[in-house]
């Protein structure tokens, strides 16, 4: 009995136990690698799904992409990093937020349309719709929109050097693109000595009086800003205002219990499926099957560790991707084992058969996994939502399954041979012992 082989098997068992402990307890205060830290999607965790529709007749694809990106940015800033934002059709955007039970809270967290615009006061006779946005009249008069946040290229907090206060006045500086610069210059030209109102949705941020024509594409928003308030407003404007208003078509609450039931069912199905696969491998391939069973256990733990470490959001399609990659790992082992049996039947020694079997199986395994990996990458970069989650887990599973089949299985198999399991009947009906 080879001492090195015993040590190798001990390392395998120690690794499996170590992975299990990491998944059960994690490391440090943040519990790195803890299985409970794996992000769960809306279908598993429960949450809110909101379908918005653009309040515009025919929004362009760029406008839709911009709106989706802005909503995703807002969700990320509020800590909803697992939320998914996807464009549906020509003018609808779906927002899925896991872990939120109150739909009104979710809508509030996303925020209003956050449309930034500049308006001037005109008489009733002069009122007309300049940029497609109507503002109701008030006691002052009628408002006409002269500029929207669409034309703002940058916003940042700064200090008003011209402030008369002894303390530095916090302001938000804006920079416009060429069109915005022209619109703003013309607006200031018409309103010298009059205020231009700066709105964010229905709230007036500021109403500075125009002292002179402002050209060059720059202006500042004044107000009673704190440093934090100016930074927050700058970040919101930098993210951009939506190019159109969004109407809520419907809101769907997915209960946490429904999601938990789906997760429990999926986990149970995975355990049963893995158990049946292991049983099949042991019956059909004996020692070879035992090597594959330990390797599959290693694979399963490695996938869970990867999901926890890389903050992958796990959904029902994602679980399907993992199960599919388990099947591919088993397929790879079957190909290898059949090649080993063929070599044993041809009269080669056990060690020579193992080496030759892995070499002969390698091209077929690489080709099969490479084509699936290409498809998974295409789904990842082109897909949205659950499709992308499926592609993520499938990609991780394929990479780990190839490593498991080609490296871990061979390592375990050689260790079994080293401890004395050399009888060819444990591997195949024929073949030499050594």
Image (spheres, rainbow, N blue to C red):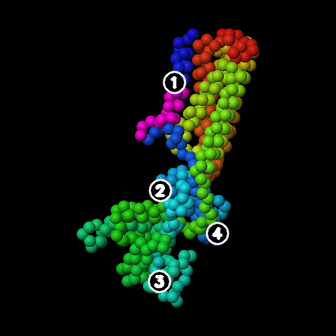
Q: Is residue 227 above or below residue 197?
A: above
Q: Closer to the N terminus: mark 4 or mark 1?
A: 1
Range of magenta residues: 14-29
Could you say whether the residue bearing mark 1 is in a helix, strand or loop?
helix
- Identify the residue at image location x=57%, y=54%: 47
Cβ atoms under marks 1 and 2 closer than 8 Å: no
Label ID, residue 138: 3
What's the CA distance linking mark 3 and mark 1? 75 Å
Question: What secondary structure is marked by label 2?
Answer: loop
Give the class, few, some or many, for how many residues have Cα within 10 Å of label 1's Cα (few <14, many ≥20). Answer: few
Where is 116 relative to 106, above or below? below
Name the residue carrying label 4.
58
In magenta stretch: residue 190:
no
Q: Is residue 394 left or right of residue 29?
A: right
Classify residue 42 as left or right of residue 204.
right
Q: Earlier in the sequence, mark 3 or mark 2?
A: 2
Q: Which mark is residue 314?
A: none
| Residue hosting label 2 | 78
Q: Residues within 10 Å of mark 4 (few under 14, many from 20)?
A: few
- Residue corresponding to mark 1: 14
| Residue 201 locus on image (x, y percent) | 49, 71
Q: CA distance from mark 3 to mark 4?
A: 31 Å
The tag earlier along the polypeptide, 2 or 4, is 4
Q: Picture coordinates of residue 388 (x, y %)?
A: 62, 48
């Amino acid at each position: 009995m080879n001492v090195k082989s015993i040590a190798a098997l001990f390392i395998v068992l120690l690794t499996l136990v170590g992975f299990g402990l990491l998944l059960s307890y994690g490391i440090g205060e943040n519990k790195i690698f803890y299985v409970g830290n794996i992000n769960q999607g809306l279908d598993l965790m429960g949450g809110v799904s909101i379908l918005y529709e653009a309040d515009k007749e025919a929004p362009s694809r760029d406008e839709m992409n911009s709106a989706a990106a802005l909503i995703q940015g807002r969700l990320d800033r509020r800590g909803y990093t697992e939320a998914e934002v996807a464009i549906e059709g020509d003018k609808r955007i779906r927002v899925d937020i896991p872990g939120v039970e109150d739909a009104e809270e979710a809508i509030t967290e996303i925020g209003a349309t956050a449309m930034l615009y500049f308006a001037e006061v005109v008489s009733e006779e002069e009122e007309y719709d300049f940029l497609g946005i109507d503002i109701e009249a008030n006691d002052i008069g009628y408002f006409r929109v002269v500029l929207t946040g669409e034309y703002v290229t940058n916003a940042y907090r700064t200090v008003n050097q011209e402030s008369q206060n002894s303390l530095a006045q916090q302001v938000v500086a804006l920079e416009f693109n060429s069109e915005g610069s022209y619109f703003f210059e013309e607006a200031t030209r018409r309103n010298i000595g009059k205020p231009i109102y700066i709105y964010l949705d229905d709230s007036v941020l500021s109403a500075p009086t125009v002292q002179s024509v402002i050209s060059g594409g720059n202006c500042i928003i004044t107000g009673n800003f704190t440093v934090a308030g100016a930074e927050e407003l700058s970040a919101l404007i930098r993210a951009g205002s939506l190019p159109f208003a969004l109407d809520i078509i419907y809101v769907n609450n997915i209960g946490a219990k429904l999601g938990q039931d789906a997760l429990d069912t999926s986990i149970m199905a995975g355990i049963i499926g893995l158990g049946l696969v292991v049983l099949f491998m042991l019956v059909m391939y004996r020692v070879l099957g035992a090597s594959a069973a330990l390797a599959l256990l290693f694979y399963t733990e490695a996938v869970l560790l990867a999901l926890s470490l890389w903050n992958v959001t796990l959904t029902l399609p994602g679980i399907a991707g993992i199960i599919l990659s388990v099947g591919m790992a088993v397929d790879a082992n079957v190909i290898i084992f059949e090649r080993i049996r063929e070599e044993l039947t041809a009269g080669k020694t056990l060690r020579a058969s193992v080496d030759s079997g892995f070499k002969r199986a390698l091209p077929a395994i690489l080709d099969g996994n490479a084509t699936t990996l290409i498809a998974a990458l295409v789904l990842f970069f082109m897909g949205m939502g659950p499709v992308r989650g499926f592609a993520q887990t499938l990609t991780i599973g394929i990479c780990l399954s190839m490593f498991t089949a080609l490296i871990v299985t061979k390592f375990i198999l050689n260790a079994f041979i080293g401890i004395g399991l050399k009888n060819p009947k444990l591997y195949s009906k024929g073949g030499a012992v050594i």
